[in-house]
């Protein structure tokens, strides 16, 4: 446990450095926004393209992994939704809270950290989980919010979802990489060096951006934030572990990556959705802040528990 914790400390130390820089205003909110944009559109995309261009679609697709991840996530999603509706919350609030309970910071924290701690081969499995998050639950939250407000589903919602996915640089980078691999196009040495150099900025840049963005988050509604953090950091990885190790035939290494990815704190993009639709943004802000702070210990614990599966 101590050895694993010491390995994760540098990652959270960079997050802490970003947080301090944001709180002291050394790094302004505008600067954080531009750093986030650089990581999202360039550095992280370069890392994903370089990796996916060396994979084939058959290498990437592991249906046992997909079904286990989808089943575990769905169970937690339904549980949180049922409790939220039972407590009298609206469909819009319920959708946002359920999203907080199952969608982790995979892009900015999971991919860089798990690639270092578990090896680059972990990225393929993380990308599979990310695809499920974006295609299934990322679409579901928008459909529920818009559908609840309009009172019906419409073609416009599907068009909005399709455009959102098409404009997501992570989806674009993975798709282009797989197409590059499918056509067996050799990567020129200068291009490979360019992608390697640019992609290497993803890890420190993403971690620093997470911390700096947390500086603007509030910690109000602590009771709800604590509950959502518990669901994300504890219930979600437990449910994933059950389906990966007991119900479905997932390889030990893939299961370890899946469980570790499920233990990540609440994703920052949920705040953007909540802010855009004006659905409980303060609640989401608090959940992101609390879950990220607690994850310093919980992620290390989970990594230690799954270590026998991948070491």
Image (tube, grey):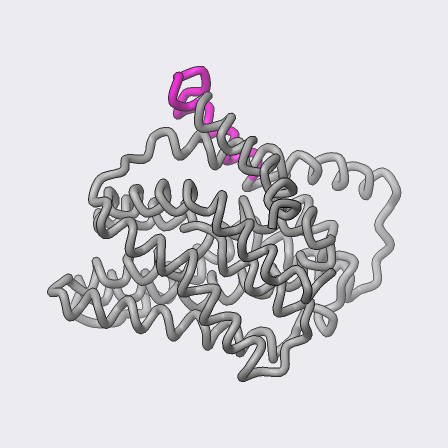
Give the residue drawn at x 20%, y 44%.
221
Front position in the image: 199 or 264: 264
Q: Which residues are magenta?
A: 22-39
**Image vertical order of residue 241 relative to residue 121, above or below:** below
- The percent coordinates of residue 57 (x first, y second) are 71, 70
**Residue 32 inside the magenta-drawn segment:** yes
**Image vertical order of residue 97 relative to residue 7, above or below:** below
Give the residue drawn at x 17%, y 68%.
85
Which residue of the protein is positioned furthest toward the left in this rendering?
88
Label count reads 0
Front position in the image: 211 or 229: 229
Give the residue drawn at x 43%, y 56%.
233
Q: Tell me the quarter of the image containing the C terminus.
A: bottom right
Residue 258 horizontal side relative to residue 94, left or right: right
- The percent coordinates of residue 99 (x first, y second) are 35, 59
Front position in the image: 197 or 287: 287
Residue 87 horizontal side relative to residue 114, left or right: left
- The percent coordinates of residue 277 (x first, y second) are 25, 50
Which secondary structure dominates the residues rendered in magenta? helix
């Amino acid at each position: 446990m101590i050895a694993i914790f010491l390995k994760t400390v540098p990652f959270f130390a960079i997050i802490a450095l970003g947080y301090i820089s944001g709180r002291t205003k050394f790094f302004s909110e505008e600067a954080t926004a531009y750093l986030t944009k650089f990581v999202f559109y360039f550095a992280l995309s370069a890392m994903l393209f370089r990796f996916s261009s060396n994979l084939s679609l058959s290498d990437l697709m592991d249906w046992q992994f997909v079904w286990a991840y989808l089943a575990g996530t769905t169970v937690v999603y339904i549980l949180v939704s049922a409790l939220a509706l039972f407590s009298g919350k609206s469909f819009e609030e319920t959708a946002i809270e359920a999203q907080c309970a199952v969608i982790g910071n995979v892009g900015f924290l999971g991919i860089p950290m798990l690639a270092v701690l578990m090896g680059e081969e972990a990225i393929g499995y993380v990308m599979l989980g990310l695809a499920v998050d974006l295609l299934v639950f990322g679409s579901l939250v928008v459909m529920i919010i818009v559908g609840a407000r309009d009172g019906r589903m419409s073609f416009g919602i599907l068009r909005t979802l399709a455009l959102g996915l098409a404009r997501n640089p992570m989806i674009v980078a993975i798709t282009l990489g797989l197409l590059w691999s499918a056509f067996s196009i050799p990567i020129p040495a200068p291009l490979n060096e360019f992608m390697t150099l640019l992609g290497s900025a993803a890890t420190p840049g993403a971690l620093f951006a997470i911390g700096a963005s947390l500086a603007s988050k509030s910690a109000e509604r602590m009771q709800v934030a604590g509950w959502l953090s518990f669901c994300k950091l504890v219930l979600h990885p437990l449910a994933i572990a059950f389906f990966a190790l007991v119900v479905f035939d997932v390889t030990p290494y893939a299961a370890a990556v899946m469980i570790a990815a499920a233990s990540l704190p609440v994703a920052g993009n949920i705040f953007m959705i909540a802010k855009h639709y004006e659905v409980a943004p303060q609640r989401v802000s608090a959940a992101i802040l609390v879950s990220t702070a607690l994850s310093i210990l919980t992620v290390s614990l989970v990594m230690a528990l799954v270590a026998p599966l991948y070491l």
